[in-house]
Amino acid sequence: MSKEVSEIEIVTDAVSYYGPIIVLAFGTFGCICNFITFTASQLRKNSCAFYFLASTLFDLLSIIFGVSTRFAADHFDSNLHRSDRVYCKIRAYLVSAIPLVSIQMKIAYRATAVAIVVSLLSCSHILYSYDLRPKCANMPGPYAMFDGMFVVVWLGIIHHGLMLTFGFTTVMNIRQAKRRIAVHWQTVGIAISSSAQSIERKKYSINHSE
């Protein structure tokens, strides 16, 4: 039994050590690829590309800040989460707010500033509730229940629900755009064919009239 427990601990330690490294590496690489793609000259004036570019920026901040600070605390004996109240509050706030801003950025081009403000303000209570107890933790009592519901409902269900909704809407818009383009080119083809037939008939009439 002790051997199995020891093996589980070894696997857990390995996952907790190498997992964040993999997430940080692949996440950063993916964000860099998105930056290269959405800053291309062909997409600079595309409003949809702006949404994804802004979202990618906050995704990158979320990955670098959230993963690196947690990794430092777990494996490099970083003591800031136990000794620095400001760091405790700011980290808890940003880890919740930045991913939320990332998804809200996809709402609309003109609502970008509003989406950022709403996302940041919705997490502002974290700055008050988190403190050193003795390490960085949430306020005990009724607020702990509120914070749990906030994480589950706002950061969990609504956050990912919006992501799913916008993703589904994007797919539907792409399909509709493809259908419109197909109908457009079909109409153009019919018009060209009709024009060609009309020209041939006129040529035929002219040749036979002579």
Image (cartoon, rainbow, N blue to C red):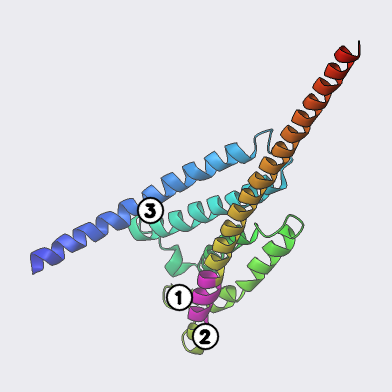
- The residue positioned 82% from the left and 23% from the top of the image is 201
> Is residue 155 inside the magenta stretch?
yes
Q: Estimate the spatial distance between the alpha carbons at disc 1 and disc 2, rounded to whole Å.
A: 12 Å
Residue underneath mark 1: 137
Observer-nearest of 74 and 189: 189
Observer-nearest of 7 and 160: 160
Residue at the right extreme of this rendering: 210
- Give neighbour class at mark 1: few <14, some 14-19, many 20+ (Cα, 10 Å): some
Label 3 is placed on what type of residue?
A: Pro
Q: Is residue 1 left or right of residue 178?
A: left
Label 1 is placed on what type of residue?
A: Ala
Q: Is residue 125 left or right of residue 64?
A: right
Q: Earlier in the sequence, mark 3 or mark 1?
A: 3
Q: Estimate the spatial distance between the alpha carbons at disc 3 and disc 2, rounded to whole Å.
A: 30 Å
Observer-nearest of 121 and 199: 199
Magenta-colored span: 146-157
Label 2 is placed on what type of residue?
A: Tyr
Q: Is residue 118 above or below residue 58?
A: below
Where's residue 202, x and y in %?
86, 21
Residue underneath mark 3: 20
Observer-nearest of 24 and 41: 41
